[in-house]
Amino acid sequence: MFHNSEHSFHTTRWSLVSRLRTQDDESAARVALSELCSRNWFPVYAFIRRMGMSASDAEDATQGFFQHVLTHDLLMKAQRERGRFRSFLLGCLKHFLGNEWQKAQAQRRGGHLAAVHLDALEAEERYHIEVEALSTSDEEVFDQSWAHGILDTAMLQLRAEQQDDGRFDLLARALTGSEDRATLMQATGMTENALKVTIHRLRKRYRELLRAAVAETVENKAEVDAELAYLVACLRR
């Protein structure tokens, strides 16, 4: 778990890609790459699963994709100025499924993939909860899964920052605006004014962390608002 926003959001997505290109130590570069893959595996799995593959085949294809990324150094060649990391990764995935999947099956679950987190049970549970009932296209499924990942990243960071406050789990539900103030006051022992101030502070910080997470996936800060609005719209479909 991360303990400050500087550590969390300066080691994600495009900045991790930059770190890969500047690492002299190959093992350190592989650690950075594995970290990047582990943070982005679920949108890949959800996209593949939605295309009609069984859970086991989707797991194999996800592992195969990251094996392809590792062995072909695709992320080493990525350029931030080409746009959104979300779009770059999806483009690589489509190319892989169209041209490389059959070749990759012979190498699946091998090589450096031991460092890439992919829990089959977790994958299917998340797929059934977040994806299965959606009526959107395969690409929109990828984007929605990506959006969930951005929200989760920001929430984990906020939780880490509030780790000394045992009331956070109770207060976190207020971030969506669906809280029962009277119930929260009773559960936390806070006055109405203190609760309002605390919720306002948490919401403000959560928005900051969301923007920071999104900023690491786009070319420049000018694109943050548009990307964030797009991801929110994805979650409302």
Image: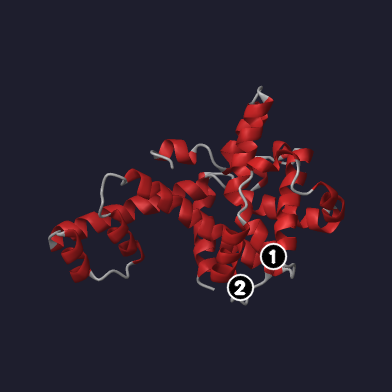
Residue 25: mark: none
- Counting the numbered discs, the total is 2
Give the mark nearest the N terminus, 2 or 1. 1
User: Residue sitting at 26 percent across and 57 percent down?
Assistant: 200
Q: Is residue 17 left or right of residue 208?
A: right
For mark 2, does the 10 Å Cα neighbourhood hold few (<14), some (14 to 19), or many (20 or more) residues?
some
In the current view of this chain or complex, which residue is farthest to the top?
Answer: 24
Nearer to us: label 2 or label 1: 1
Tell me the SS state at disc 1: helix
For mark 1, does the 10 Å Cα neighbourhood hold few (<14), some (14 to 19), or many (20 or more) residues?
some
User: Residue sitting at 50 percent across and 54 percent down?
Assistant: 150
Classify 130 as above or below 213. Answer: below
Location of residue 198 (image quadrant):
bottom left
Image coordinates of residue 227 in percent, x first then y, are 54, 56
Image coordinates of residue 178 in percent, x first then y, are 32, 70
Q: Is residue 193 left or right of residue 216?
A: left
Q: Is residue 79 left or right of residue 201?
A: right
Identity of the amino acid at label 1? Ala
User: Residue sitting at 59 percent across and 76 percent down?
Assistant: 133
Check disc 2 and report the residue beneath it. Answer: 132
Identity of the amino acid at label 2? Glu
Check contact, mark 2 vs mark 1: CB within 8 A: no
Tell me the SS state at disc 2: loop
Coloring applied to the structure: secondary structure
Q: Looking at the rendering, in which quadrant would you find the C terminus?
A: bottom right
Q: Is residue 218 visible?
A: no
Classify 134 as above or below 56. Answer: below
Check disc 1 and report the residue beneath it. Answer: 55
Classify 33 as above or below 105. Answer: above
Q: CA distance from mark 2 to mark 1?
A: 12 Å
